[in-house]
Amino acid sequence: MKRTYLWMLAAVLLLIGCGGGQTAEQAEEPEQTAPAEELGPAPEGLTMELEHDVYDPSLTSYIYFIHNDTDQPTGVFGASYAIQRKDGGGWTDLTMKDGVGWDDIGYTLEPGQTMALSCGFWLYEEAPAAGEYRLVKEVDGALLTAEFSLGESPYTAQTPYGFGPLEDLPERYGAADAAGTGAVIFTDAGTENAEAVGTFLEKASLGIPCQLRTVQDHGESTPMVIDVICENDGFLWRMRSGGTEVAERRLSYIVTDGTDLYLSDGADWDAGERYGDQRVFLVPPLQGTEWVPDVEAMTADRLAWNATRYQLRSADGVWCAALWEEPTAFSVSWQKPGEGSGSSTYDLADWDGLETAITGLAWREDGKLTLKCETADGGTSRLTFDPETETLT
C-alpha cells in the first residue's frame, strides 16, 4: 500500500461489515478530554479526515482517519471525540446524551501510519440534519479537526457506499450510465477511474466496510457489472451480465498470482491451490498488475498474525468454516444479526482417528458442512458436520 495502515473499530460502529506501532491500554475510569481551547495546534503532518466530505442525514455513522506523516510517534491518545455544528461564524458543541462515555484506552501512532476509527451522532441528543459540521479530537495534546457536511449525497443509510443494488440498474447498464458514479469502467478505449481499485484495497486492508463496482463494456457484448462488498471480515461478490439476474458468492480474501487480483477462500495463493479454491477475478485479467505489490503486502500481514489458511462461507453469510495448518483441525464460526456471534474449533483426531487430513470443504444447501478427507489406509472419506448440533457423521 502507499501507506502503512493501522486500525481500530469502535464497539459502536454501525457499518461493520480488519500493526505495529499501535498500542492500547484499558482502565476502568471514563476517558477525560481536555476542552478544545486548552489544546495546542497539531504538528505539521499530523492530520485527520473523514472518509467522505458529504453524507446524507439518514447515515449516522462515519469512518475517519488519523494520519501521522511526521517523523515522530505520537504520544498516547484516546478514542474520544466531539462533533460540532457550524452556527454563523463559529462552532457549537452538540449535546452529549446522559451516561455516554469512553473507556480509558490509549493509542500511539508511528511515523507513516494511519489509524481508522468511527464516529457518529448516536452520542448526541441532536438528530442529524442538513448543515456543516466538524469532528474535533485530541491527539497527544494537540487539537485535530475535520469538517464534513450533511446534505444531498450518494452515501445514505440505504446506500452507505454510494451504490444502489444491481437489481435496480437499467437492463443494459453500461459505460455511459456508470460514468461519474464512482465505478471503475473497462472499455476497449481504456480504463476510467482506476484509482478506485487502490482506494478499495486500502480500505479492505483495514477491514473498513466498503464497495468496489466495476463495469466491463466492450461494445457488441452485453455489459457486465460486478459489485464487491467488503463487510464482516469477508467479501460479497455479485455479478450481473444481461437482464436482471444476479449471481453472487461469498469469499474471504484478496490474493494474487503475481499478475492478477482475485477473490479467494485461500489465505494465500498456495492455500487456495491446496484446497481446490474456486477464485473469481477482482478486476478483469491483466488489469490489476499495478496493485499486485499492495495485495502481496496484505497477504504477508495476514499470514503474520492469523493461522487460518482457508475459509469457506455459507451462501447466507451466517456460517464460516476454516482450516488451519494442523491437517485434521477445523473451526466453524457464526454471525447472526441481532443474536451475536461465536466460534468453535474441532479436531477429527478426537472422533475416530481414521482421518489424517482434511483436503476440502463444501457447504450444503441444508446448512451442513461436508469435509473431504484423506484416511489412514490411503483412501478418502466424506464426513458431514452439523454446526447446529456439533455432530459428525
Image (cartoon, rainbow, N blue to C red):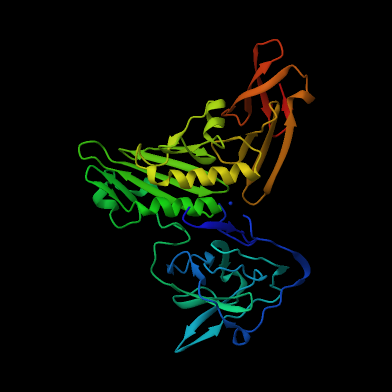
Horizontal side, residue 32 vs residue 44: left or right: right
Residue 338 can be seen, yes or no: yes
Horizontal side, residue 381 vs residue 234: left or right: right
- Residue 63 picture location, percent across and down: 53, 63
For this orientation, the residue located farthest to the front is 71
For this orientation, the residue located farthest to the bottom is 89
Horizontal side, residue 276 vs residue 352: left or right: left
Q: Residue at x 74, y 25 (%)?
A: 348
- Residue 190 picture location, percent across and down: 25, 46
Please tell me how many numbered marks the rendered image carries: 0
Locate the C terminus and report the quarter of the image it occupies.
top right
- Residue 284 picture location, percent across and down: 35, 39
- Residue 337 picture location, percent across and down: 61, 50
Q: Indicate whether 100 appears above or below 92.
A: above
Q: Quadrant of residue 218?
A: top left
Q: In the depicted view, which residue is nearer to us: 393 or 31?
A: 31
Q: Indicate whether 31 appears above or below 296.
A: below
Residue 275 can be seen, yes or no: no
Q: Indicate whether 91 appears above or below 46.
A: below
